[in-house]
Image (spheres, grey):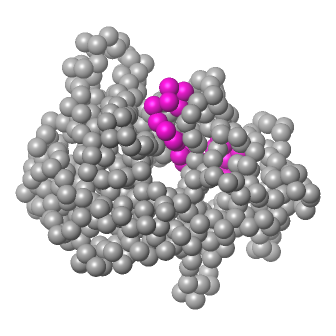
């Protein structure tokens, strides 16, 4: 998605008032709704206050000036899955040149850290004894050695710029393309009906035979440890050996590379999907019932919906514990300071379901129950991570997930802990969502969010999603419409 050049201002962080009533430094102005007018223009509607959440009588207050903190985490995600933010290259020289462009951009935006996806699937942007080479580096073929070490290059060049390098891992994802995608059907030589009739081991064998999954892919070696949902494959979080494998993957990287942090995204158990207008949840088809019978019930979890939900949450927390222990052991042994950070979904749980939750409606998604089963609130309280980057990818006036209330919720969750909160902002929605959500046509939406964060003592940085969505557009190439 193309973005207005004005988004470049976000990290420059000018002290302009961005349309709010001018007041003395340190004061705030009440936020009003940004709308599309009858004549097609956009602007603030002074008669419509924006409140913290539906039912609140407290108007969101935005500081009228921005004061740059002495210390602040400023970064963006560089996604390699499907080459979203970083293209395939033919040579090491091409890789170096492309990465230098990324670093040049980060430097021009005053960023001080890069979050780069080094494991988009069960693969690697580095030589590994545990994972095959990523298909997204050069050839499009998983397991093909590019002949150089991309991660070593990136760490060295990033540190030359005085920036931190955060290695971003997806812990469980095996495939990101649906089983019945025509290009996949062509490669495996099957019809849609034949593909859907395959068991998970049969699908893995077919993809391996077609060269889509490499011989040394963990899923190929352990098909019994793989689940399928929404026609996509992922490792079964309930199997202890899977947790150990992911932790070993992290150990390999922190041992061999001078990374500043290990970074996980929010892909744990699958999110819910919509089929024919109805919500479909992982577990509806008893996808992990056998695993629960083997590992859950014998360990005291009740054979109920609540019991299996608790077990799933504990599976993810156990993985987090094992990764944290791996990093802590490395730090203690090598006298290093590698951090562990996670960027979870922006809503933990709704207050109607849990008194500790946010003022968000129960129709919205959440991470504690129903979907990914990530107890991020407790991870903060138990200091299982060093930093958290909640993906608060909504505007102030989004009733399903209002930015102001959620930012305050995450700030309060970190109170009394050593966990740093860096907010994840949805740059990709600027213009991209403008057709149906006027707030994202506002070039001040994210600057307003960043000024708002100045009022939150435990929020100490921002991360923008994603790299491509910050880059300046060539306006001449964008249709007038």
Residue 151 lies left or right of residue 9; in this view the side is: left
For the residue pair 120 and 100, the one nearer the viewer reads as 100
Farthest-out residue, left: 209
> Does the magenta-highlighted stretch encompass residue 342?
no
Q: Residue furthest bottom?
A: 476
| Residue 282 placement (x, y as % from top left) | 36, 36
Res. 223 image quadrant: top left
Place of residue 456 in the rendered image (x, y in percent of width and height, measured from the top left): 71, 42
Q: Is residue 385 magenta?
A: yes
Seen as rendered, the residue at the extreme front is: 335
Q: Which portion, as a residue range, is magenta?
A: 380-407
Identify whether 466 is placed above or below 264: below
Say which residue appears at 59% left-offset and 23% top-offset: 354
| Vertical relation: 60 (above or below) 351 | below
Q: Is residue 45 visible?
A: no
Q: Is residue 354 visible from the viewing direction of this image?
A: yes
Residue in the image at 67% along x and 54% along y:
70
Looking at the picture, does residue 353 appear above or below residue 47? above
Residue 80 location, x and y as percent? 35, 62
Tell me which residue sits at (28%, 13%) in the image.
299
Q: Is residue 224 left or right of residue 430?
A: left
Name which quarter of the figure residue 251 lies in. top left
Frontmost residue, 398 versus 331: 331
Instruction: Please indicate whether residue 376 sits to the left or right of residue 22 in the image.
Output: left
Q: Position of residue 124 (x, y in %)?
A: 25, 56
Which residue lies at the image location 15% right of the left edge and 36% below the top edge?
Answer: 224
The front one of 479 and 390 is 390
């Amino acid at each position: 998605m193309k973005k207005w050049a004005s988004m470049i201002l976000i990290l420059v962080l000018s002290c302009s008032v961005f349309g709010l009533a001018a007041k003395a430094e340190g004061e705030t102005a009440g936020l009003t709704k940004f709308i599309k007018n009858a004549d097609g223009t956009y602007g603030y509607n002074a008669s419509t206050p924006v409140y913290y959440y539906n039912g609140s009588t407290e108007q969101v207050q935005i500081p009228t000036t921005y004061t740059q903190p002495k210390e602040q985490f400023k970064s963006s995600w560089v996604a390699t899955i499907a080459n979203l933010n970083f293209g395939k290259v033919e040579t090491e020289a091409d890789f170096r040149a492309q990465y230098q462009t990324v670093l040049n951009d980060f430097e021009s935006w005053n960023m001080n850290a890069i979050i780069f996806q080094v494991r988009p699937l069960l693969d690697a942007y580095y030589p590994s004894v545990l994972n095959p080479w990523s298909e997204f580096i050069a050839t499009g073929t998983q397991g093909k050695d590019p002949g150089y070490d991309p991660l070593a290059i990136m760490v060295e060049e990033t540190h030359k710029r005085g920036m931190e390098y955060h290695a971003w891992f997806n812990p469980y994802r095996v495939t990101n393309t649906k089983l019945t995608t025509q290009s996949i059907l062509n490669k495996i030589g099957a019809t849609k009906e034949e593909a859907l009739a395959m068991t998970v081991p049969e699908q893995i064998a077919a993809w391996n035979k077609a060269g889509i999954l490499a011989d040394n892919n963990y899923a190929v070696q352990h098909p019994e440890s793989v689940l399928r949902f929404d026609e996509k494959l992922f490792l079964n979080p309930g199997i202890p050996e899977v947790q150990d494998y992911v932790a070993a993957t992290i150990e390999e990287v922190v041992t061999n590379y001078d990374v500043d942090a290990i970074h996980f995204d929010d892909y744990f158990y699958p999110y819910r999907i919509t089929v024919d207008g109805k919500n479909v949840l992982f577990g509806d088809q008893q996808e992990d019932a056998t695993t629960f019978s083997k590992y859950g019930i014998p360990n005291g979890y009740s054979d109920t919906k609540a019991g299996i939900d608790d077990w799933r949450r504990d599976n993810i927390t156990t993985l987090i514990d094992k990764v944290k222990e791996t990093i802590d052991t490395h730090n203690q042994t090598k006298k290093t300071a590698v951090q562990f950070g996670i960027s979870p979904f922006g809503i933990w749980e709704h207050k109607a379901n849990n008194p500790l939750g946010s003022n968000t409606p129960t129709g919205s998604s959440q991470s504690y129950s129903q979907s990914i089963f990530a107890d991020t609130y407790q991870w903060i309280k138990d200091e299982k991570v060093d930093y958290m980057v909640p993906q608060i990818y909504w505007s102030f006036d989004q009733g399903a997930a209002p930015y102001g209330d959620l930012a305050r919720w995450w700030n309060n969750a970190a109170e009394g802990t050593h966990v740093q909160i860096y907010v994840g902002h949805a740059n990709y929605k600027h213009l991209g969502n403008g057709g149906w959500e006027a707030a994202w046509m506002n070039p001040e939406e994210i600057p307003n969010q960043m000024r708002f964060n100045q009022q939150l003592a435990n929020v100490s940085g921002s991360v923008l999603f994603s790299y491509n969505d910050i880059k300046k557009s060539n306006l001449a190439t964008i249709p007038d419409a």
